Amino acid sequence: MHELEIIKDLILDSQKEILVAGMPRRLQIQVVPKKATICIGVRRCGKSTYMQQIMTATLATGVARENILHVNFFDDRLRFLHAMGPSMVIDAYYSLYPEKKYVEKIYCFFDEIQVTANWESFIDRIMRTEKCDVYITGSSAQMLAIEIATEMRGRSLSWEMFPFSFLEYLDFKNISVGKNLDTKTKLIIQKVFKAYWDEGGFPETIGLEPALRIKIHQEYANTLIFKDIVQRHDIQHPNAVLDLAHQLVENTAALYSVNSLTKYLRSLGHKISKDLVMNYVTWLEDAYFLFSVGIFDASIARNKRNPKKIYCIDNALAKSISSGILLNTGHMLENLVFLVLRRTYKKIYYYKTNSGKEVDFVVQAQDRSKLLYQVSESIADKDTRQRELSGLQEAMLELNVKHGMVITQYDAEEFNNEAGNIKVVPMWKFMLEHHSH
């Protein structure tokens, strides 16, 4: 079949599909005229469903179904476009509906367009020359990069989507949360938090039996590594990437260095350079699978010299694909705190005081103010309390920050000392109070 005919068939098929309703998300994308709307995030977090919700809302305004152009570039039948680029898509659409060109507005929805060559210039062109609104999903953090903004001449706005937050998980369970929580509601929320802790936030796996959930999570990870890393970057020895990914997930919320990772992979028989290991880590981060956090230090050289900490996109996914030998409740709690912070902030670091004590997170807000967070399962034990609080207090004094927070499983209190105000907050409450999307 001719390539143009394949695309035309896919366009017509998509216009006959029943749109998935799905659960409304708390991510509020704002559409700006003459700018493409890009929704980016890890595979299976709900981006395509979110786009279908936008399609449904568009149709509800009276737009004809034929005016919606929806193409999923991950469709195997469109592999020929990966090297050619997506230009043929718009040609195929207007060969079906020539009367609409320059007359009626077309609503373009492109899933995973980043797998095609020169997609940025294609979007730039149709935004300039066609009467259209454009919505894009992608699973590459590079779609946030300044190079794309330059290539598209500022014709796009990017939004990140993550698996369900705790508030979205509560929405999914039809549990409404007001500002003032009575005792019964608090108990319900704490019970649901335990379920969220076990199930994670990937929409498709919520409510499944543990064995099936683990199987699906493992499939997610393998697909992500194969399609987003091995295929996209034409890696000849995929087992090295698999072994690296598993090693990093096993060490969630722990420090790593490229040197130590390279030695580990070489011990498994992989003939690999440090530069290649660095690339693999970068690509795992680009796919929103893992996140690296560096030390907070004014010196760029010291920042590069120090090891980084690694975090995973979803607690339940991490537990599903790890052996569980190194992961513990403290690591998972810290990972969950990171994910809450990452929804709102990009500049997240860890900190070491002058005396060598560590603070888990230093966040730099947009106004350049700093926020300090320490994570501990419990501070009921006297020695643990002293260790966690002394590090936080030292950091507050050294960085001139007047407020600090300790996130625990269940403890709650508030006090003042010479460093300033410190709040001890249980995890469930922290997630409700620090919700972004």
Image (cartoon, rainbow, N blue to C red):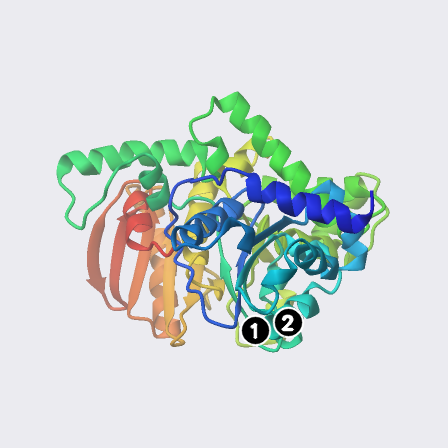
Judged from the image, the secondary structure of the residue bearing numbered disc 1 is loop
With respect to residue 336, does 31 lie above or below?
Answer: below
| In-image side of 165 versus 92 (left or right) | left
Answer few, some or many: residues within 10 Å of disc 1's Cα (few below 14, many 20 plus, some between 14 and 19).
Answer: many
| Circle 2/circle 1 CB separation < 8 Å | yes
Q: Residue furthest front?
A: 99
Name which of mark 2 and mark 1 comes first in the sequence: 2
Q: Which residue is mark 1?
A: 155
Residue receiving disc 2: 124
Which quadrant would residue 214 be assigned to in this image?
top right
The amino acid beneath tag 1 is: Arg
Is residue 244 in view?
no
Please identify the quadrant where the N terminus is shown. top right
The residue shown at (34%, 71%) is: 397
Q: Check disc 2 and give the amino acid type.
A: Asp
Query: Residue 69: where, in percent of width, then height?
Result: 59, 53
- State whether residue 294 is above or below residue 197: below
